[in-house]
Structure formats: structure tokens, C-alpha cells
């Protein structure tokens, strides 16, 4: 046996010894000092098993060879599940869900960059910014950002990206808010959802694209769906958090004065959770913007596509200007939503 | 409380255990295992243990205990913010535990309201919206809301917050916030008011103001108030009756004076040691016997009845027993020598106090005039007397030593 093999054996034996010690300590405390003997026996048994299997020509210490069928055929399972979905429901989903929404998005897109003149759009956003923050400096910055975008001749892709993000966030809110509220109200549902959210957030965003494209094909709808799934977790989490952060005595007061469950939710919990919900919307928008470039790989038009072109054609300038517009858009949306969040808190600053 | 119709709220053997499986721990608690032992062995906390209480109608009932004694847990059982592990809560003889969701909500709206330690105001609602919160829950439509807002305005005015209707709670001082809390509770028009350490978060001067306001309101409203506090002075000031809670158990129930003069355990005795006794002990409780003669009696007769001492003070009353004044032994002797007919002409004025006056109020009276203060009833009949020395002795006594003097 090689040096590495001996080191591995010693480590595995030590692991078996330690595990046996821990298990006997909690589950068989009556054993006392005899635990050491049992643990040593366990370590010996594991070592023997490995040596015997090695001598028998079936080593457990080497990884499976490439191309071999893995012991746990997860990939095949996922493939089969998605295939089944596509063959069973693909056409129906495309006809009833994606096509109408794609049409709506197209309409919205054209509305943003064709129907409305760009200065009108800039002014509308500046007014938004002023309404949210009551600061003319922010309004001026927002208007300036739109002027820069126009001057870079990236107005159309920017509006396409804006429409993609708007629709994605709408979908995220429609699904995420009820989920977050349910989590805030039910401990059991929360326990169930936490690993799902962790999974959604940690799974590389690329991975979402594969099944979505198979189901709905390349294009805007797949982009919206992938973006919405990727952007949902912060909104869900912060809605849940907002509901749970409401002062315990305030909730007790609502109960003591005879508020029903729905009255408590609508009149006390949700209004008090709004600043956190708004922070969730803000975070979701930022996540959605991060998805823009990735979504361009499945044919979503907009700034992401420009960045992608820059990469493909080795034009650093194209990539940089489009990326710069994404940054400007991110700052504008971030400042406006944050200012709205602060406005909501203004009523009861210092009350928590 | 011999008369059961006077009992507004009754707790019967209420036990509360906090933890994941309280029902499994209950037998151990019922067997009398200590709080520490239960925590050590099962990880459960005993909040209340076999608490039985009768809370009379129309009085202020104070539950007093240090932090961790279970007093906040106790008050939350009354409106079922907390459900007991075992035992019953009866309000007007009705078992609160039997109420289901809808009935419980109706019960909370109609029967009791609550004031919280950290106010529990809704930060997103104005003062007016806070006060009308409970009323708004019960009405629908614009007209209903107008009515509840009008009612809320009245209570805002009652607690002295006119002009602050549109302010948000964070803009108010602590005392003002708790006035909002009080108005919100009173606006519900429930006959039971639960106050959970309502004044504990306020600074001393404001606290006193609020206590005065509560005493004043209560003298008009006559609600059944359950008041939780850790402050003995507050308990004695507000409470018609006081229950002392320690480690989730009731140690003693009684009037402030009873608790002060006859503490049930060493714990209570230690507790009441530092109390300002002058504010609690009444003239009636420590009054001394005194000699009383009628004004028509001859001095010689009076001297014989009242005793011979030079410094002996004798109170003189009219035929109906009403106090006229006082006289010393030496003066009576002089009157005998001067051959005065009756006591009437000898009478000199003296200070009087009623039996329910606290010693703090009586003491200054003893400094005016030469005679001890006469303790009289409403008709002016003499019940006893209080000398300066007797009052000081009573104030200086350690708890448990003062015994009511036999008449």
C-alpha cells in the first residue's frame, strides 16, 4: 500500500474512533470508561474492512472512473424529470403562459423606448426620485444618468433591460410576498422554506437557464423566469424578517384589544414590516440586474446582450459602455427604492 | 370576600410551565419540585404554580413581585395572551378557557383592555388612530369610524392630550405615550383594566403624576383594575388589595396595611422593611385608648373616671358623644379647687384626625396644640388618640412588631 493509502487509513480509523466515542457518550453514557474499548474496536473493524477490500481488488479508497455510471444517478434523474415536463406540458405552457407574457413584455418594451420620448422618461424618473427622497440633488443625478445613457446611444437596450427587470420584479413580488408573509406567520412553513431559499440563492444562476430554456425556448420569457427565481429569495426573506421584527408588545396590544388574525396582519404587522419589504424589493432589483448579462446568453435582448457582444467580438469598449449603463441603472433604481424605504420609516423613526 | 357576587375575576389553581412539553412536566411541578430542579431536569421554566386568586369588583388589585416572579405571566392569563398549563380563569363566573377563537376575540373587545409596560403603541398610527384602534376593529364603514374617532377624542382629552391627536407616538415623551396607552385602554369601555407595570418605565415624577391621574380616574370610573408592579410604594399607593408573588406562587394577599403589619413570611417582611410606613399605616390602626368624659359631668366625677395623673389628657364630649375638646389632669384639679360646676368651661380645642388618615398626614397635626390628636369617626365621636410619641414609635418599628392596640 502506498504512503497516501496509509495516511488515508489512519485518518479513517481515527474518524471511526472519534465517531464511536461521540455516539457512545450521548447514547450509552452507562458504558463509562469501556467506551474507549468499543471505539478502538470500531476503528479496527473499519481498518480491516478497508484492507480486506483492497486486497480483494475492490478498493473503496479510489474515486469512480470518469464515464462510469455514478452510484447516485442524480443527473439522469433530473434529465428524465425535465424531459417528462417538456413532453407532457411544454406545448401547453408555451401556448398559455409564456406566449401571452412574451407579448405583454414586448408591448411594454416598445412602450418604454418607442412611445415615450427619452427626455420624458428621464423627467419621469427624476420626479420619482424627488418624490421618494425630497432631495433635488438625487433628482438631478437621475436625470443626468439618463442623459448619459442616451448620449452613449444605448437607450433602447437600457429600456429593454428596464422592462425585463420590471416584469421580473413584478413576478417576484407576486410570488415572493405571499411566501414571505406565510413564512412570517407560520414557524413550520418557515422551517420548510429556509432550505429551499438557501438552495435557490446558492445554486449558480446559470443552472436555472437549462430547464427554463428547454421548457420555454430561448428568449425573453425564459429570461424573466430565470431572473425572477434568482431574485426572489431576498424579498421572501426580508418580508418574513419584517413581520417577525414587529415589537412583541405591539403585537400583544393588538391581540389584547381584540384584533383577529387578519386584522393583526393588515393593520399592524404588514404596515410595520413595509420598510423591510421595501429593502427586500431593493435587494431583489439588484439581484435581477446581476442576472442581466447571464440572461443575455439565452437570447434576452438589452444591455446584457451588448456586454455579451463585447465579449464575443473582443470589443472592450462595447462591453464597458454597456456595463457602465447597467451600473447607472442599478444606482438609479437602488437610490429611488431606498429613499422610498426611508420615507416609510420616517413616521416612526426611533420607535423600535 | 364572603359575597361571591363581588368577585369579578377568579383564578383557580393556575399553573403555567414554559417549554416544549409542559404537560409532561406538570406532574413533577404538582408534586412540588422546585423551580430550579424542574429547570435542571427538564429544561422547562415554571411561570406560575397553583395560583388561586379572587379579584373583587370595582377595586384596584395589585399583584406585586420582583422580576421573574411571574407577575407579567399572571396578568396575561386574564385575557389569555398566555394559556395556562393547568387551572381555570373565571371572569364573572365564566370560564375564559372555554372560549374559542371568535368568542375570545369578542371577549377581549368587550370585557377587558390592557396597558403595557413599554406602552405597546402602534408606531405607524397617530395618537388618535392609536386610541381608536380597538374601536376601529369593531366597526366598518366611514360612519362607524367617525363614531370611534369621536369617542377616542374624548378620552384623549380626558388624559390631557388635547392637541396631540395627529402626532405620532415617537414624537411624545414617555409619560405622554403612556397617557395614550391609558386612553386607548379606557376608550374600550371595558369594565376590567389590566395594567402591566404600566408606570415602571417612567421617571419618578411622571410616575407619581400618572398614579395620581389613575387614582382620580378610578374614583370616578370604579373599574376593576388589575395592576402589576415591582414597586412596593406604588402597590401600597394604588392597591385596595395587594397580592405578593414570589417564584410563581402567591405568598400573601391582603390590604397594604395588613401586609405591612402582619407579613406572612420572612420574604414579605424583608420586602416591606424599607417602605415609608407613614404613607401606609393609618391613625385607626395604631390609635391608643383614651379617657372620655361628657361636658355636663362635675370635675371631681370626671377626675375619678379619667384617672389621676397630672399629665393625663381627657377628651370632653357633648351629650351625643361629639368631641368638644380636651383637658389635662392638672386643669381638672384646679377646677375642683375653684369649685367649677361642670367640665364644659374647661374645654380647650384639640386637633382631630379620622381613622383612615395615614400617619404622614397625622404627624403634622400633633405638632399643633398641646394635646394628642383625637381620632374621631364621621360623627365626631372619639375613637382613640394619637400622641406624637406613639406615631414616631409606629414609624420606627420594624415590620411585624406593630400590633393593633386593643381598645
Image: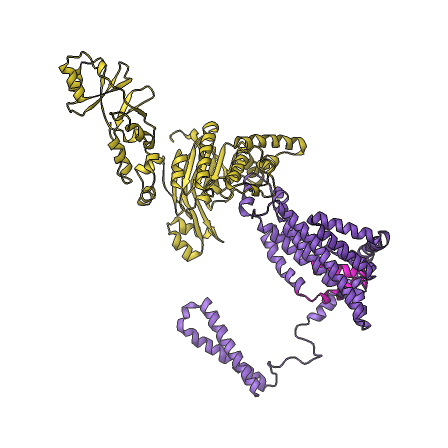
Chain colours: A purple, B yellow
Left or right of B308? Residue B121 is: right
Residue drawn where x is 31% and y is 41% of the image: B264
Residue A165's quadrant in the figure? Answer: bottom right
Indicate yes or no whether the magenta region holds residue B314: no
Residue B389's quadrant in the figure? Answer: top left
Percent of width and height locating residue A90: 80, 61
Left or right of A117? Residue B294 is: left
Pick the front one: A208 or B348? B348
* Residue range of the region highlighted in magenta in the rendering: A202-231
Indicate yes or no whether the magenta region holds residue A211: yes
Residue drawn where x is 59% and y is 54% of the image: A188
> How many numbered circles does the render carry?
0
Q: Is residue B124 above or below residue A92?
A: above
Q: Residue furthest right?
A: A114
- Which secondary structure is most common in the magenta stretch? helix
Residue drawn where x is 43% and y is 77% of the image: A37
Pick the front one: A78 or A229? A229
Percent of width and height locating residue B16: 45, 47
> In what quadrant of the picture does the N terminus of chain A appear?
bottom right
Asked whether the viewer can see residue A7, the reply is yes
Percent of width and height locating residue B156: 55, 33
Q: Residue furthest left?
A: B337
Amino acid at each position: 500500500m502506498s504512503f497516501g493509502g496509509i495516511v488515508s487509513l489512519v485518518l479513517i480509523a481515527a474518524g471511526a474512533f472519534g465517531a464511536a466515542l461521540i455516539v457512545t457518550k450521548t447514547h450509552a453514557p452507562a458504558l463509562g470508561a469501556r467506551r474507549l474499548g468499543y471505539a478502538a474496536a470500531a476503528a479496527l473493524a473499519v481498518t480491516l474492512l478497508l484492507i480486506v477490500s483492497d486486497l480483494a481488488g475492490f478498493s473503496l479508497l479510489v474515486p469512480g472512473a470518469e464515464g462510469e455510471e455514478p452510484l447516485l444517478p442524480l443527473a439522469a434523474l433530473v434529465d428524465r424529470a425535465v424531459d417528462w415536463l417538456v413532453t407532457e406540458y411544454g406545448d401547453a405552457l408555451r401556448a398559455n403562459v409564456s406566449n401571452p407574457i412574451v407579448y405583454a413584455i414586448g408591448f411594454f418594451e416598445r412602450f418604454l423606448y418607442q412611445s415615450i420620448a427619452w427626455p420624458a422618461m428621464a423627467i419621469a424618473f427624476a420626479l420619482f426620485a424627488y418624490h421618494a427622497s425630497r432631495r433635488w440633488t438625487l433628482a438631478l443625478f437621475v436625470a443626468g444618468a439618463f442623459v448619459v445613457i442616451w448620449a452613449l446611444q444605448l437607450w433602447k437596450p437600457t429600456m429593454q433591460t428596464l422592462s425585463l427587470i420590471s416584469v421580473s420584479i413584478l413576478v417576484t413580488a407576486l410570488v415572493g410576498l405571499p411566501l414571505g408573509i406565510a413564512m412570517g406567520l407560520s414557524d413550520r412553513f418557515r422551517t420548510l422554506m429556509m432550505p429551499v431559499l438557501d438552495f435557490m440563492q446558492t445554486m449558480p444562476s446559470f443552472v436555472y437557464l437549462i430547464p427554463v430554456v428547454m421548457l420555454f425556448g430561448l428568449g425573453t420569457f425564459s429570461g424573466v423566469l430565470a431572473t425572477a427565481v434568482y431574485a426572489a429569495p431576498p424579498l421572501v426573506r426580508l418580508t418574513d424578517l419584517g413581520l417577525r421584527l414587529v415589537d412583541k408588545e405591539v403585537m400583544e396590544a393588538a391581540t389584547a384589544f381584540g384584533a383577529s388574525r387578519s386584522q393583526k396582519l393588515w393593520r399592524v404587522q404588514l404596515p410595520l414590516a413595509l420598510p423591510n419589504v421595501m429593502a427586500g424589493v431593493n435587494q431583489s432589483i439588484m439581484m435581477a440586474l446581476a442576472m442581466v448579462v447571464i440572461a443575455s446568453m439565452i437570447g434576452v435582448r438589452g444591455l446584457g446582450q451588448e456586454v455579451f457582444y463585447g465579449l464575443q467580438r473582443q470589443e472592450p469598449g462595447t462591453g464597458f459602455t454597456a456595463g457602465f449603463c447597467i451600473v447607472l441603472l442599478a444606482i438609479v433604481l437602488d437610490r429611488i427604492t431606498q429613499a422610498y424605504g426611508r420615507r416609510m420609516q420616517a413616521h416612526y423613526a426611533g420607535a423600535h | 370576600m364572603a359575597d361571591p357576587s363581588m368577585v369579578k375575576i377568579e383564578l383557580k389553581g393556575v399553573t403555567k410551565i414554559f417549554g416544549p412539553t409542559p404537560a409532561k412536566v406538570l406532574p413533577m411541578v404538582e408534586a412540588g419540585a422546585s423551580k430550579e430542579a424542574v429547570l435542571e431536569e427538564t429544561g422547562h421554566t415554571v411561570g406560575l404554580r397553583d395560583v388561586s386568586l379572587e379579584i373583587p369588583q370595582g377595586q384596584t388589585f395589585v399583584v406585586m413581585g420582583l422580576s421573574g416572579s411571574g407577575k407579567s405571566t399572571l396578568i396575561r392569563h386574564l385575557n389569555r395572551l398566555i394559556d395556562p398549563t393547568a387551572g381555570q380563569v373565571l371572569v364573572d363566573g365564566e370560564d375564559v378557557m372555554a372560549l374559542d377563537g371568535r368568542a375570545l376575540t369578542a371577549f377581549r373587545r368587550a370585557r377587558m383592555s390592557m396597558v403595557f409596560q413599554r406602552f405597546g403603541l402602534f408606531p405607524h398610527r397617530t395618537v388618535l388612530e392609536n386610541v381608536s384602534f380597538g374601536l376601529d376593529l369593531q366597526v366598518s364603514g366611514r360612519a362607524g369610524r367617525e363614531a370611534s374617532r369621536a369617542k377616542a377624542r374624548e378620552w384623549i382629552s380626558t388624559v390631557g392630550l388635547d392637541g396631540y391627536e395627529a402626532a405620532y407616538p415617537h414624537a411624545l415623551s414617555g409619560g405622554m405615550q403612556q397617557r395614550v396607552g391609558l386612553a386607548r385602554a379606557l376608550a374600550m369601555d371595558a369594565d376590567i383594566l389590566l395594567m402591566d407595570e404600566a408606570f415602571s418605565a417612567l421617571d419618578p415624577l411622571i410616575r407619581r403624576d400618572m398614579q395620581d391621574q389613575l387614582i382620580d380616574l378610578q374614583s370616578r370610573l370604579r373599574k376593576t383594575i388589575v395592576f402589576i408592579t415591582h414597586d412596593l410604594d406604588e402597590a401600597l399607593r394604588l392597591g385596595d388589595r395587594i397580592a405578593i408573588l414570589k417564584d410563581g406562587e402567591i405568598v400573601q394577599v391582603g390590604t397594604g396595611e395588613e401586609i405591612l403589619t402582619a407579613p406572612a413570611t420572612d420574604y414579605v417582611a424583608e420586602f416591606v422593611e424599607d417602605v415609608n410606613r407613614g404613607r401606609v399605616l393609618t391613625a385607626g390602626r395604631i390609635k391608643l385608648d383614651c379617657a372620655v368624659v361628657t361636658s355636663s359631668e362635675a370635675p371631681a366625677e370626671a377626675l375619678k373616671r379619667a384617672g389621676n395623673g397630672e399629665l393625663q389628657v381627657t377628651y370632653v364630649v357633648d351629650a351625643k358623644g361629639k368631641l368638644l375638646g380636651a383637658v389635662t389632669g392638672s386643669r381638672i384639679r384646679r377646677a375642683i379647687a375653684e369649685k367649677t360646676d361642670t367640665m364644659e368651661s374647661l374645654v380647650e380645642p384639640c386637633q382631630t384626625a379620622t381613622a383612615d388618615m395615614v400617619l404622614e398626614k397625622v404627624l403634622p397635626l400633633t405638632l399643633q396644640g398641646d394635646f394628642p390628636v383625637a381620632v374621631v369617626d364621621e360623627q365626631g365621636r372619639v375613637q382613640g388618640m394619637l400622641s406624637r410619641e406613639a406615631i414616631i414609635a409606629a414609624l420606627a418599628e420594624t415590620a411585624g412588631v406593630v400590633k393593633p392596640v386593643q381598645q
